[in-house]
Image (cartoon, rainbow, N blue to C red):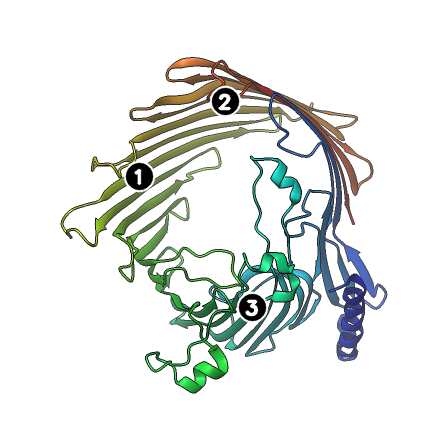
Amino acid sequence: MGLKTLLLTIVLVILSMSCCYAQDMGQVDVKHPIKINGSLNLQLQSYSAVGIPDREQAFTWMINGSPTITILGVALPFNFLFSNFNNRYYQPFNQFGVSPYYKWVKIHLGYRNVQFSPFTLAGYRMLGVGIELTPKGFRFGFMYGQLNRSTTIDSLQNANPLAFRTQPTYSRMAYAVKVGVGNEKNYIDLSFLKGWDQVNSLSAQFQDSVAPQENKVVGLSLQKTFLKRIVWKTDLGFSIYTLDTRATQYTDVANTFFTEKFISDLVKPTIATQYLLAGETRLGYHGNRLGADLIYRRVDPDYKSMGAYFFQTDIEQYSIAPYAHLDSGKLSISGNGGIQRDNLYNLKTATSQNIIASINISFNPSSKFGVNANYSNYGITQNPTRISSQSDLFKQVSDNYTLTPYFNFSNQHSVNNIVFVACYEQLTAPTANINSSPNQNTMVGSFSYSHTWLPKGISGNLSLNYNNTTITGQGDIGSYGVGIGTGAAFFKKKVNVNLNATYNSNYFNSTGNGYTLLTALSCTIPITQKQSLQLYGSYLDNNSLNTTVVQTFSEYTFRINYGFTF
C-alpha cells in the first residue's frame, strides 16, 4: 500500500465516521473539536569499537512517536518509527500505523498487531487495513494486508564468510475474519485466516530454491463464566499448511476425513500439505483470595499459522496453577505444576517427559521490608521408542532458587533502599551416557544500596556483584566486582546528572582473566515543561589475559535524545 493511498484512506475513514457525530454532539466539547496529544522522540547515536568488529552501526538516527488526534470525540492513535538501521535485505524496520476508534468501531491502517485467536491471527505485525466492530453482544473483525515483503540475497554477504546468510522470501499476503457473540466474560468467536506467498514477487532465479507456501487456519475461542467465579476458557485451531503450492495435488482422497468435494473445492491438498491441530482448555476458580486453574494443552508437531510468530509444538501438557492472597494481600503465593510430553505421533526415536513445578512467594508485611522467593524444578526424561520402554536414553533436571529481600527507609530528609539478590541454578543429568549434558551449577549474587538526600537533590549508590558458572569436566567462569554512582540536580533541580562506574574482575578455571570496566555519564536537561534533552555517553574497556575465551576490546557510545510531549 502506497503512502498516498494510506493517507487517502485515513481521510475517508474520518469523513465516513463523521456521520455518527450528530446524535452525540451533546457529549463532545464543541469548543475544542480537535485535540492532539502524545509524544515524539528523536535519537542520534555515535558508536565505535577497537579490538573487535563493530557490534553496531557507526552512526544511527531514530524518530518514533505515538500521537493521538481526537476529532469530535473520534480518537486516532498513531504510532510510527523511522531510522537508518541497516535493513535493506530484511523486513522493514520503519513502520507507520494508526487505529482510529469511536465507541464500538475501530479501524486499523498501516502496520498493526491484531489478535483474533491464539492459533490463527495471533498478533503478527501486518501492513494493511482492517476493522473491528464490537456493538453490544456482537464481535466482528476483518484484516487484510502483507505479512512479509519480498527479500533477496545481499551480495555483500558473500564477501564475508562470517556474515549471516539470509534466505530470499516471497511477498506474503493474508486476510483474516472473526465473527462472534458475547462480552468480555462470556463469548464465542469463530475465526479464519488465509495466507499465501505471491510467486511473482520473487525473482525467477530464486524460485527454484524457495518454495511458495499457503495456509488456511480455522480457530474457535470461547469463554464461559459460572457463578461469577468459575471460568471455562477454550481455544482451538485447525491449520491446513501447504509447504509448496507447486506440489502435485491428490486425486484420491478416500482415506481422508473430508469428503472429496470439500477437499477439492476448498483445501486442494497436495503431497506437501499438512493437517495440524492445536488447542488449550482451562477450567478455573478465580476468587479474591484463593483460586486455581486446571489446564490441558496439546499442539501437533510442526503446527504453524502464518498469522503467528511461534508455537511450542509437539507437546501435550497437563498442569494446575493455584494462587492465594493471604493476610490482607501481604502474603501472595502462586504456583504451577504438571507433566508435559512430546512425540505425540511416535515419529521420533525418543519421547521426552517433562516435569513442571514452580512456586512464587511474595511477603510484604510493611512498606519498609519485603521478600520475594521463587523455586522452579523442570525435569526431562527421554525414553527410546525402538529399544526398550524401561531404559532411559536421557535425563536432565533443572532446579532454580531465587531469594530477593529488600528494605526501604524514608523520611522527609532522605530515602534509603537496600536490595539483596541471590540465585542458584543447578542442572544435573542423573543418567551418565553419551547423550547426557555435563552437570552445571550457576551462582549469582548482588547487593545494592542507594541513598538520596531530598533537600539537596543528591543521590549515591553502591553495589557488589558476583557470578560463577561451573561445568563438570570443563571448569568454571565468572566475575566479581563493585559499582559506584552518584547523581545530582542543578539549576533549581531541573538539570539531572548521573555518573556510574562498574569494575569487574574476571576469571576462568579459577585463574584471573583480566577485568571489565564500564563507565557511563548521563544528563537530562529540560528545555520547556514539555520538552527535554537527554545526553548519554559510555566507555567499555574489556581486558582479557586469555583471548581464546574473551577478546580484549573497548567500545565508545554517545547518544542524544530529544523528547517532546504534547
Q: Which residue is mark 1?
A: 398
Please name the residue shown 26% across and 59% down the image: 346
Looking at the image, is 116 positioned above or below residue 422?
below
Please name the residue shown 50% across and 22% down the image: 550
Circle 2 sits in a helix, a strand or a loop, which is it?
A: loop
Which tag, 3 or 1, sits closer to the chain's start? 3
Q: Quadrant of the N terminus?
A: bottom right
Q: Position of residue 518 (x, y in %)?
A: 59, 21
Question: Do residues under tags 1 and 2 come within 8 Å of each other at their CB atoms?
Answer: no
Which tag, 1 or 2, sits closer to the chain's start? 1
Tell me the distance, in whole angstroms, between the alpha carbons under discs 3 and 2. 45 Å
Left or right placement of residue 6 versus residue 219 in this view: right
Q: Which of the two discs, 1 and 2, sits closer to the camera?
A: 2
Tell me the distance, in whole angstroms, between the alpha carbons under discs 3 and 1. 39 Å
Looking at the image, is 471 positioned above or below residue 18?
above
Q: Which residue is mark 3?
A: 195
Q: Residue furthest bottom?
A: 261
Q: Position of residue 109 (x, y in %)?
A: 70, 65
Q: Which of the two residues, 138 or 169, is positioned nearer the viewer here?
A: 169
Q: Which residue is mark 2?
A: 550
Mark 1 crowd level (few <14, some 14–19, many ≥20, 10 Å Cα): some
Amino acid of disc 2 = Val
Q: Position of residue 264 (x, y in %)?
A: 46, 82
Question: Do residues under tags 3 and 2 come within 8 Å of each other at their CB atoms?
Answer: no
Circle 3 sits in a helix, a strand or a loop, which is it?
A: strand
Quarter of the view holding residue 220:
bottom left
Please name the residue shown 35% across and 58% down the image: 314
Amino acid of disc 3 = Gly
Amino acid of disc 1 = Ser
Q: Which mark is residue 170?
A: none
Q: Which of the two residues, 410 or 112, is positioned nearer the viewer here?
A: 112
Left or right placement of residue 496 versus residue 309 in this view: right
